[in-house]
Image (spheres, coloured by chain):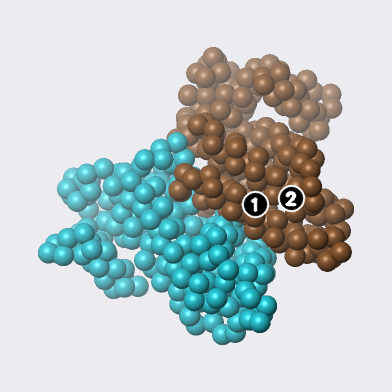
Chain colours: A brown, B cyan
């Protein structure tokens, strides 16, 4: 898990600057931030707590991240690719028709939502806490990630022969996001399954009848 | 607006204890909490800030609310009935078929989501901030409210002749909640409209064909 995460952080930063090698310290800070922010929220966790979790002084932390805001951005950037990759693998590993494979994304999500450490979607929870700061760098990171998921959904719905894949992708995305959020209200993962049935029905309704 | 709010707080507390008259002070505190918590989130706002907004000392505030947790609960309880009443009026005032009237809930929500002070759903944002505290009294208040919306949706879908109204109500609810949350990510209210189209399609698909 740590190895996968480190490789991911390397590859992520590599996108911005191919010549930069990410220091193990920066990786340790990002991982500590990811664990604590996801567990309790971005305002509930102090920079002190992250430095302590990473086994570093606050001065060292601030050498790598100039502000808490940049740390929140890094937290979401670190979650983006693993999240999208999970969705992709859930879809690719599923058998059956296109609606059934879209529904499989939700079935897998339901399993994950039952884990005691699951706390919904880190991107949505962060956007909720920063609702009054739409220009925050973490909001941009969240928006980029959700747009990437939406683009991937658009591609697979297009490849599957659906009508209006961009609209359908946004609707499936909102069912995923609605399920993510309502489970934190009721703490009942059956909602994820119900959202999956809705997504499957919408996809079916957007397929030419010969493909049903 | 203030008068409506006061009447609402009176009626709410009346449910629990018919003989209690809510003091104007308690109403002022609840209203200050509602404004500040909704604007910035529950952790970003201190009890001091709420006391100041209400024009009271912190001691007076604590006389009426023993803890910040109870203030957060009161904030959500105060939003519950006005929120449900808004949904009901949007549906009742709409013309057309059942799918069109369900879609009208989203059209109205889209207008509200364009307001500069709109910050999504206070219930979902609070549940996101308290994701690690599922037993918090505010989570119970949020769950009660969302269940009341779900029950109302179930009734109108049942009265409209839909198949499986309880499932369909949950699916429509998750499209509303998904729209609430994704707009805070992209700050683009067009998503609310797309969610409304999905809800209308799901309702159509669950109506006997003679009613289409």
**Mark 2 highlights which residue?**
A100
Residue at 41% from the left image edge and 38% from the top image edge: B133
Check residue A196 in the rendering and tell me which mark sits there, or answer none. Answer: 1
> Looking at this view, is B83 or A88 the one in front?
A88
Q: Residues within 10 Å of mark 2 (few under 14, many from 20)?
A: some
Q: Secondary structure at mark 2?
A: helix
User: Does residue B116 appear in this view?
Assistant: no
User: Does residue A190 appear in this view?
Assistant: yes
Is residue A57 positioned above or below A164 on the image? above
Q: CA distance from mark 2 to mark 1?
A: 9 Å
Is A75 left, or right, of A23 in this rendering? left
Q: Which chain is indicated by disc 2? A: A
Is B207 left, or right, of B147 in this rendering? right
Residue at 65% from the left image edge and 40% from the top image edge: A108
Residue placed furthest toward the top: A55
Quadrant showing the C terminus of chain B? bottom right
Q: Which chain is indicated by disc 1? A: A
């Amino acid at each position: 898990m740590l190895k996968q995460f480190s490789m991911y952080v390397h590859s992520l930063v590599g996108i911005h600057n191919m010549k930069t090698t990410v220091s193990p310290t920066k990786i340790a800070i990002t991982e500590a931030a990811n664990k604590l922010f996801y567990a309790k929220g971005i305002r509930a966790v102090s920079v002190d707590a992250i430095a302590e979790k990473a086994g570093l002084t606050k001065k060292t932390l601030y050498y790598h991240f100039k502000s808490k805001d940049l740390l929140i951005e890094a937290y979401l950037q670190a979650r983006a690719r693993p999240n999208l990759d999970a969705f992709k693998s859930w879809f690719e590993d599923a058998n059956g028709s296109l609606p059934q494979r879209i529904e499989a994304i939700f079935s897998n999500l339901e399993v994950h939502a039952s884990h005691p450490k699951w706390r919904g979607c880190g991107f949505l929870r962060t956007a909720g806490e920063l609702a009054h700061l739409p220009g925050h760098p973490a909001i941009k990171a969240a928006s980029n990630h959700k747009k990437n998921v939406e683009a991937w959904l658009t591609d697979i719905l297009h490849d599957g022969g659906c009508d209006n894949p961009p609209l359908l992708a946004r609707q499936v995305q909102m069912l995923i996001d609605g399920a993510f959020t309502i489970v934190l209200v009721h703490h009942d993962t059956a909602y994820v399954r119900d959202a999956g049935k809705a997504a499957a029905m919408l996809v079916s309704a957007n397929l030419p009848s010969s493909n049903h």
